[in-house]
Amino acid sequence: MTPKETEDLERWRLMLGGGAADGTGVQLSGDLSQVDMALTALYDFERSNRNFNYGEKEKRGGSEGSNPGISRWLGDIRKYFPVSVVNVMQNDAMKHPELKQKMIFEPEILEKTEADVHLVATIMELGKLIPSKTKDTARKVVQKVVDELLQRLEQKTIAAVTGALNKSARNRRPKHNEINWNETIKKNLKHYQPEYKTIIPEVRIGYGRKSRKSLKDIILCIDQSGSMGTSVVYSGIFGAVMSSLPNVKTRMVVFDTAVADLSEDLKDPVDLLFGVQLGGGTDINLALKYCSEQVTKPDDTILVLISDIIEGGNVAEMHQRAKDLVDSGVQVICLLALNDDGTPGYDQENAAQFAKIGIPVFACTPDLFPDLMAAAIQKQDLAMWAAKEDVVLKK
């Protein structure tokens, strides 16, 4: 058997999980044996490993807390797999209630867990159940992920939103220091004077005068039911960034069967995320009622509803409130998800009703969200924007 054939059989053996039925007849050794043990511990957990006594025979030394099996397993998957795979395996482990509590409730183990947005969502979901001894570690994990997300998304969001605000606030009688020279030159190319080799700026385009009043009011209305965890994390990051911008007034409202206004916490996204309690029912109608009461200038308000729109409250009233908001001039957008996980399950009838009254409905990745907000601020046709970005609108 050639080395390539042996390697292929070993890969099949890892995928099939061993046993008489796998048909490979391959015995794994060395690192491949450890990889197989790490995979089996997780993906054969229900059948043979309920107590997760991982690596018990090895009796490795070191301080590993009260759940050494989990600690060893986390160390091994980080040793043998790339970070992207580690994150997938951790997320799969979180689907088992027994493993979830073992990974979150012990500070020594939580420190070894690969921190990502899904882990933060799990910490938010467990909330007050997290014991006091682990809360400081949990906060450090959330802070680490928040810092990484801000580094990735903050500058793009600031550039997109401020650029859109500048364009939407153009004036035709700008002072010298307010002139947008690029746009002014483009507008006046037809007035080029060959003999003088210059352009006569008959039309001057400015960025708009700075004002202490907000040019746009943005309301993020976020479903905090359990399935929306990662969307809540990203929403908190974007809300914190936009709330720091001049000329933008940002509110963040979260809801389940009750409504909580977390706008005052936007200055600290870590505090904000710890103020969210994932889980519970969904009353979109109640949330839209609250948001409508916060609107003071409809024509300059953008309401982003982030929800799978599976309504647990009064559906007919929800539709009417959404229509009333649109009719008043509020620009309403419905995001089924704000994450990299794809479109979740959602209520197709509610999506169709929203689309009928002019509310675009789609899922959005975090990297696209700044551009979406820029398009909304400039009141672009979001259907055309979505087509340009290969975003599928739900109808």
Image (cartoon, grey):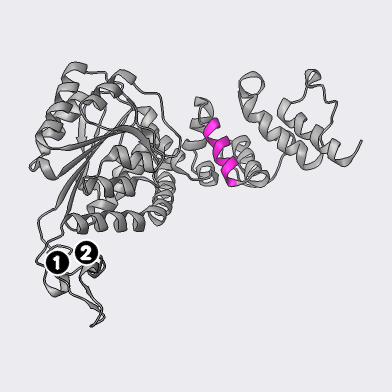
Q: Is residue 10 left or right of residue 276?
A: right
- Kindly identify which residue carries mark 2: 187
Image height check: is 394 above or below 302? Answer: above
Q: Is residue 285 left or right of residue 21?
A: left
Residue 56 in view = no
Q: For the residues marked 1 and 2, what is the alpha-carbon distance in whole angstroms?
A: 7 Å
Q: Position of residue 185 (x, y in %)?
A: 24, 69
Q: Position of residue 235 (x, y in %)?
A: 32, 42
Q: Is residue 176 left or right of residue 30?
A: left
What segment carries the magenta color? 83-93
Determine crowd level at label 1: few under 14, some 14-19, many 20+ residues with C-alpha closer than 10 A: some
* Residue at 37 percent of width and 46 percent of height: 368
- Verify whether residue 86 appears in magenta: yes
Instruction: Check contact, mark 1 vs mark 2: CB within 8 A.
Output: yes
Q: Position of residue 258 (x, y in %)?
A: 21, 27
Please name whichever residue, 373 or 238, is drawn nearer the observer in this view of the structure: 373
Judged from this view, the residue extending furthest toward the right is 1
Q: Amino acid at mark 1?
A: Val
Please name whichever residue, 30 or 64, is drawn nearer the observer in this view of the structure: 30
Q: Is residue 244 left or right of residue 140?
A: left
Quadrant in which the C terminus is drawn: top left
Quadrant in which the N terminus is drawn: top right
- Kindly identify which residue carries mark 1: 203
Q: Amino acid at mark 2?
A: Lys
Image height check: is 247 above or below 40? Answer: below
> SS of the residue at dot 2?
helix
Judged from this view, the residue extending furthest toward the bottom is 196
Question: Can you tell which mark lies on residue 136?
Answer: none
- Verify whether residue 32 appears in magenta: no
